[in-house]
Amino acid sequence: MLDFIARRLIAIIPVLAVVAVFVFLMLRLTPGDPAAVIAGDNATSDQIADIREKLGLNEPIWTQFAIWIGDIVQGKFGESYFFKKTVAELIAQRVEPTLALALCTLIFAVCVSVPIGVLAAYRQGTLFDRIVMGFSVLGFSVPGFVIGYCLIYVFAIELGWLPVQGYVRIGVNFWQFAERMVLPSLTLSVGFVALISRITRASVLEVLNEDYIRTARAKGLSNRVVLMRHALRNAAVPILTIIGLGIAILIGGAVVTESVFGLPGLGRLTVEAVLSRDFPTIQTVILLFSVVYVVINLLIDISYTLFDPRIRY
Amino acid sequence: MFSFKKSALALVAAAGATALLTAAPVQAQTIKAVMHSDVKILDPIWTTAYIQRNHGYMVWDTLFAMDEKFDVKPQMVDKWEVSADKLVWTFTLRDGLEWHDGKPVTAEDCVASIKRWAARDSMGQKMMTSAEGFEVVDAKTFKLKMKEPYGLVLQSLGKPSSNVPFMMPKKTAETDPMQQIKIEDVIGSGPFIFKADEWKPGEKIVYVKNAKYKPRAEPPSGLAGGKVVKVDRVEWLWIPDVQTQVGALQNGEIDMIESPGHDLLPILAKDKNINLFNGNPTGNQYTFRFNSTAKPFDNAKIRHAVFVAFAQEDFLKATIGDPQWFKVCKAPFVCGTPLATDAGMADVLNGNAAKAKQLLTEAGYDGTPIVLMQSTDLQVLTNLAPVAKQQMERAGFKVDMQSMDWQTLVGRRVKKDPPSQGGWHAFLTSWVAADILNPVMAGFFNSSCDKAMFGWPCDATIEKFRDQFAKETDPAKQKQIVEDLQKYWANNPTHINVGQWYSPIARRNNIEGNMIAPAPVFWNITKK
């Protein structure tokens, strides 16, 4: 097992190297000039040229890359062109809302989608099954921002139960934090619930036709025990896989959801950095997302061993 | 007779009243506003972006300021005089001016601030070419010595929009003009104090009332007069999504939106808790900018043909829609301001495609496609380029409209490459009226070739008019120069003004007070 983890951790290095080169080149080769953005609308060409010189953007592209990689290896992520803060500080400031949103979404989505997926499989062909599958199609089809606006209109503006936007740090006031998390988490989890419930249903359906399920029933075990202990556990591996892959959806969805609900998280930081061509911030945030994605999928791989004893690393 | 019941009730009532009087916290008056952008940069001299200008007005003060009638009035200055030969200007500061750290504002601070501002600002640079230098007389008095009479000294020091000559402590003002000031140096003498510990870029910026600020005695007018702060705290929250901004305002989570989208105004107008307030009656001006170095726009006659082909109303209807929020105005220095005039404009902006076609033939236009950049992510600009394309094509131009996000356009417009190799011929943008009140202030009139703004027009005649205007001290003669300039410019345009438009502030009804100024200001307003 330790060998496997070590091998996977070492495999992260080439992945990050590829991501680093790709992101760096993409930013340099796509149009847009951070110096012109910083200088503002009334700036003269000389002023823009001065700023470009100060930012080191006149250096050859490979020199810029070497400087950046050298800094990254030393744990220096650079300074934002705009905020006069280090990128590490910016990320530290923005990580809590994104982490909170992701965790709330994940918990809500798993708690809702796995039971309804199992029930839909158990009651295959019934009205309940059709409703779940219909919801699943709807969840995939409706864009997150539309769901967000609808929830805002109903629960915040019409009913006045929840705030439209904003974020209160958990340490400042838990209840204000919680009420501001409800709508964004619901919005982001719709697509996730649709995905997991569909996969759960398909996996459980496959397992329900296995001989050992028939044996369990023949032993006189209750439906609950058969479903939870025998069927779900054996169907868990594909469900866990899809949750791991869904982290990418979660990161992508966070960008939109944070913008709609005014959450000052990493998703919004990414959008703002891209729009203002803040190269050091974009590069570091994308590297961070890559690390998170790879590490979560490593944890998912490790967790397979808990559900399927045949899997050994 | 003693009544236990009455005494008990009285005791409870007294206790309740005492509790109300002592325990109830005094509610700090906080205005929560969503501005047009997030404050990412804290130095209003380092960048010309409007959000930094607005931030500057909160923290710093100015020597002079422009009032509602476009007159320049003293602000930090108590008295000023100019010598008979108009070569020596003497300024004396008001008593009791203090920086937020409690140190007094001195003449040395002001001289250093003017020097840093002039190194960055085109109007400041122009003034300094006629200046000999400064002399600090005492702690409150300094002189500006000129090499020759200069007509725009007060207009420069009272410049209302980017870059605004904000006064900073000498130590801060001595920062290299090409570098940003540090966060700990965001110390001004203005009506609000910046709360560095609460600044979260991308989330909010907080200002608290400067209790030691001494407002002028005159009533507020524009950016001049008494800046009386009537709230304890102002928070600028950043909500990027316009629909969410509107929801938050309707829900009472915020008090105002500086610049709500025009398509959302009908929703806001219907809400009985919200009012729409035009705080900037001169508004903004849409502008079509030529790249005067790229063929065929290096030919003035072809640029003039575009001027003849355009009609403003189509642009305004396509972008703003509701006539309540736009005005057809041929005056390049903005209708409603002292230098507004239609001189020289009779034959242009009439949508005369036939005349434009004839001009193109005479000028020998060879059918070179015009690379017209269209920004697609700023709603107030998006529909301008398709209208320009349609009007130009009707006149016989071939137009290659290329769509991109605004920041890509900003990056591309500084490139002098040929249009077919990543350069450009034209794009459309918008100016705040306060930025274009005269030919020296208006950056697109600068025709000093490589030193001009992107588009780089090279026209000695326009430069001569600008110099004459700057050095003329008689307002009547200045107006005559503007008329002569316009007559020439209509045939040799550096850009085209395609209409005036207004952006109301949406605010909840509990916000009251005077906010009529070219930049949004937070003094003299109350929250009930």
Image (cartoon, rainbow, N blue to C red):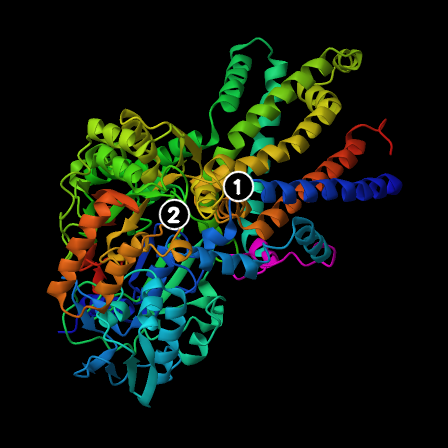
Taking the magenta stretch, the answer to whether it contains residue A86 is yes
In the structure shown, which secondary structural element does the residue marked by tag 2 occupy? loop
- Above or below B139: residue A174: above
Label 2, on which residue? B455
Chain name for mark 1: A
Span colored in magenta: A72-91
Where is residue B65 shown, x and y percent of the image? 23, 68
Residue in view at x 34 percent, y 34 percent: B385
In the structure shown, which secondary structural element does the residue marked by tag 1 occupy? loop
Q: Nearer the viewer, residue B422 or A89?
A: B422
Q: Nearer the viewer, mark 1 or mark 2?
A: 2
Taking the magenta stretch, the answer to whether it contains residue A218 is no
For the residues labelled 1 and 2, say whether their Cβ atoms are less than 8 Å apart.
no
Which image quarter: residue A162? top left
Q: Nearer the viewer, residue A110 or B493?
A: B493
| Residue B106 seen anywhere in this rendered image of the structure | no
- Above or below A223: residue A293: below
| Residue A150 seen anywhere in this rendered image of the structure | yes
Label 1, on which residue? A31
